[in-house]
Image: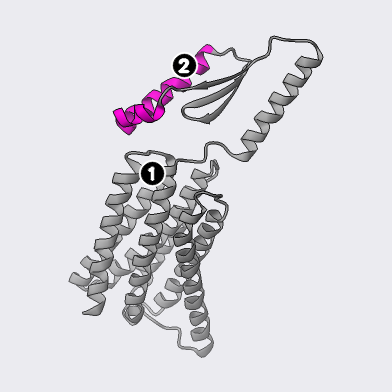
């Protein structure tokens, strides 16, 4: 009865977190990162319902399948953080591929003695992804650093938990007691689902704050490149007595009022049109630096 109660709590939390993330995060502040994070919460929500269905039907394979995508959601957190940081190589498809293989392996071994080993390996991979989440969060600077603390604690805690499970598996192999099917692992089920529930809440607090704060406008590398180019060209122009170079700072008027008076989708169309108009008007030799969707600096 206790396991069923924990599963119901996980279903309720996963559903609530998904609704909150989409309603307060993705829809008002659409971005590549918020899409990935919303997909992660939705994945956990679907898997929680699969656990309920597995309990109702007594299907070990269905219960085993639910663990893979749930762990993949941790990978989505890491991928979303990389997307927010402005990285092109966010590794979305490799992440999905790795956890898809683990999900298939869990399903194939659910009713065999190999399930315990495969599950521990899957949790180990999830622990690595969780440690990567913590490392990405530590890159975030103030004033958002304080909002990352809940997820950092949860990520490191899960990484430690996965390491403990892996060490337990190694110990069982050494003792010759490694044979465990899905039914034999039910003793850990309440602990796993409780950990998932805590992780969900901590993840929601952090990623919702990051989503509403907006993506990192530009990477340090991009800012440095533009500054070097602008400084070099203006310096050479000054030395040559060329007075025709200008640095333009173009901003969209009243962006906050525009966002409040329209939907997020409409505001996105306005900022996209703003960028397109600037690119159309400026000559090909102009250097355009996008500080934010509503502000562009141009050296022309």
**Up-down relation of residue 200 to residue 165 (above or below):** above
- Left or right of 4 on screen, residue 208: right
Numbered label tally: 2
Q: Position of residue 177 (x, y in %)?
A: 45, 88
Give the vertical position of 101 relative to 292 (above or below). below
**Overall secondary structure of the magenta stretch?**
helix
Viewer-proximal residue among 149 and 283: 149
261 vs 37, left or right, is: left
Q: Which residue is mark 2?
A: 277
**Residue 275 on the magenta segment:** yes
- Placement of the N terminus among the 4 image quadrants: bottom left
Q: Is residue 292 magenta?
A: no
Pick the front one: 41 or 142: 142
**Which of labels 1 and 2 is toward the front?**
2
119 with respect to 238 (left or right): left
Residue 33 in picture, x, y percent from top left:
44, 44
Q: Residue at 55% across / 43% down in the picture?
A: 87
Secondary structure under the numbered disc 1 in the rendered image: helix
The figure's colour scheme reads: one colour
Q: Going 45% across and 65% down the picture, which residue do you hit? A: 154
How many angstroms separate mark 1 from mark 2 (CA)? 27 Å
Q: What residue occupies the far right of the structure in this picture?
A: 239
The residue tagged with tag 2: helix, strand or loop?
A: helix
Disc 1 + disc 2, Cβ < 8 Å: no
Residue 256: x and y in percent read 38, 30
Please give the label number shown on residue 94: none
* Residue with the mark numbered 1: 35
User: What range of the chain is rendered magenta?
Assistant: 255-281
């Amino acid at each position: 009865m206790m396991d069923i109660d924990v599963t119901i709590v996980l279903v309720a939390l996963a559903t609530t977190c998904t609704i909150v993330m989409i309603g307060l995060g993705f829809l008002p502040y659409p971005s590549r990162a918020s899409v990935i994070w919303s997909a992660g919460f939705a994945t956990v929500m679907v898997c929680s319902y699969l656990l309920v269905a597995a309990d109702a039907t007594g299907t070990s394979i269905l219960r085993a399948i639910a663990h893979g995508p749930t762990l993949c959601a941790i990978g989505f957190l890491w991928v979303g953080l990389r997307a927010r940081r402005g990285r092109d190589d966010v590794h979305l498809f490799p992440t999905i591929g790795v956890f898809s293989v683990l999900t298939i392996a869990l399903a194939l071994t659910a009713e065999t003695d190999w399930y315990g080993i495969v599950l521990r390996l899957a949790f180990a991979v999830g622990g690595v992804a969780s440690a990567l989440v913590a490392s990405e969060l530590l890159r975030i600077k103030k004033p958002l650093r304080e909002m990352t603390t809940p997820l950092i604690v949860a990520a490191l805690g899960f990484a430690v938990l996965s390491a403990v499970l892996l060490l337990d598996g190694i110990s069982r192999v050494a003792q010759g007691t490694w044979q465990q099917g899905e039914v034999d692992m039910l003793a850990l089920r309440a602990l796993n689902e409780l950990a998932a529930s805590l992780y969900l809440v901590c993840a929601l607090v952090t990623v919702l704050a990051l989503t509403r704060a907006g993506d990192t406008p530009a990477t340090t590398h991009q800012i440095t490149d533009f500054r070097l180019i602008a400084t070099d060209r203006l310096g050479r122009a000054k030395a040559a007595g060329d007075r025709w170079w200008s640095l333009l700072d173009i901003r969209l008027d009243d962006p906050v009022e525009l966002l409040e008076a329209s939907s997020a989708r409409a505001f996105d169309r306005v900022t996209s049109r703003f960028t397109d108009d600037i690119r159309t008007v400026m000559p090909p030799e102009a250097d355009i630096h996008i500080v934010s969707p509503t502000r562009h600096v141009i050296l022309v």
